[in-house]
Image (cartoon, grey):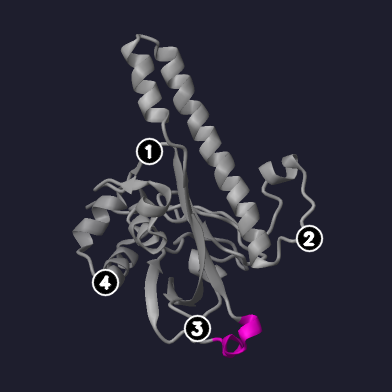
Amino acid sequence: VHAFWPANSIGDDVDLYTDETRRKKLATFYFLRQQMHKPAGQFNHCLADYVAPKSNPAMRNPESADYLGGFAVSIHGADELAKEFTAANDDYSAILGKALADRLAEAFAEYLHKQARIAWGFGRDENLSHADLIRERYRGIRPAAGYPACPDHAEKRTLFDLLNAEKNAGIKLTESFAMHPGASVSGLYFSHPEAKYFGVGQIARDQVVDYAARRDESVAAVEKRLAPNLGYEI
């Protein structure tokens, strides 16, 4: 399942809207910004940088309006098959089956991303080889919650609610935001021509406090989820 929504960035967040009037907010994705010492001329990145800001006057022109996409894909049956192999003391086949399902899910995500670029318009003239696709020589990125550019797994909840992923793709989220079936992939589509993957890295407490306030959560809850990214001791 995949979808697109009218979107604009506000600071380090991205607001989604119910329709093209952009008057009624549908949901918000909260992102983190790098806090690194970089040489002059280099910037600390945030995923919100790749979505046009709401304050940009050009957004009043429908042709300049920006969007954000989201997706969730899954391969069903691999976990049950692995249990059957394990019960038959065939651990090799169990491991191989899960690995194959993971690769199929990634391939599905790659295929759906191509279809999304075509639907978006800028991917219609792509003429990329399989090698080019593997090297991601196409416009846009599809970062996933829990990965370096968006380390907070909690953002999956917003995405799954928007996509109604449990009903439309049969994917469930656990309390710790793990996806079931295990061979599942989800993420966001960014179309900016200069969008690239990056790692948020270590962040300071001031950003954690700000992020918690934006999400209307306690600092302690955010610190627990973002423990690997904390640049300070709790």
Q: Amino acid at mark 2?
A: Asp
* For the residues bearing labels 2 and 1, Cβ distance under 8 angstroms: no
Q: Earlier in the sequence, mark 2 or mark 4?
A: 2
Q: Which residues are magenta?
A: 56-64
Instruction: Give me the C-alpha separation between circle 2 and circle 1.
Output: 34 Å
Q: Which mark is residue 181?
A: 1
Residue 119 lies left or right of residue 20; in this view the side is right
Establish if 136 lies above or below 10.
Answer: above
The amino acid beneath tag 1 is Pro
Q: Of the two numbered discs 3 and 2 on the same chain, state the one appearing first in sequence.
A: 3
Magenta portion: prevailing SS class:
helix
Q: Residue 164 in the image: x percent, y percent? A: 38, 58
Give the SS element for disc 1.
Answer: loop
Who's the residue at 21% across and 57% down the image?
Answer: 221
Residue 148 is at least partly visible in this image: no
Q: Is residue 81 above or below residue 224?
A: above
Look at the numbered disc 2 and give the secondary structure of its residue: loop
Q: Nearer the viewer, mark 4 or mark 3?
A: 3
Label placed on residue 125: 2
Alpha carbon distance from label 2 to label 4: 43 Å
Q: Tell me what residue is drawn at x 38 percent, y 75 percent.
A: 26
Label whose residue precedes the other's in the sequence (2 or 1): 2
**In terms of image quadrants, where is residue 124?**
bottom right
Residue located beneath label 4 in the image: 213
How far apart marks 4 and 3 lie (CA) works out to 21 Å
User: Dot 3 lies on which element?
Assistant: loop
The span from disc 1 to disc 4 (Cα, nearest Å) is 32 Å
Question: Do callouts 3 and 1 mark residues in contact (Cβ within 8 Å)?
Answer: no
Q: Residues within 10 Å of mark 1 (few under 14, many from 20)?
A: some
Give the labeled residue for mark 3: 54
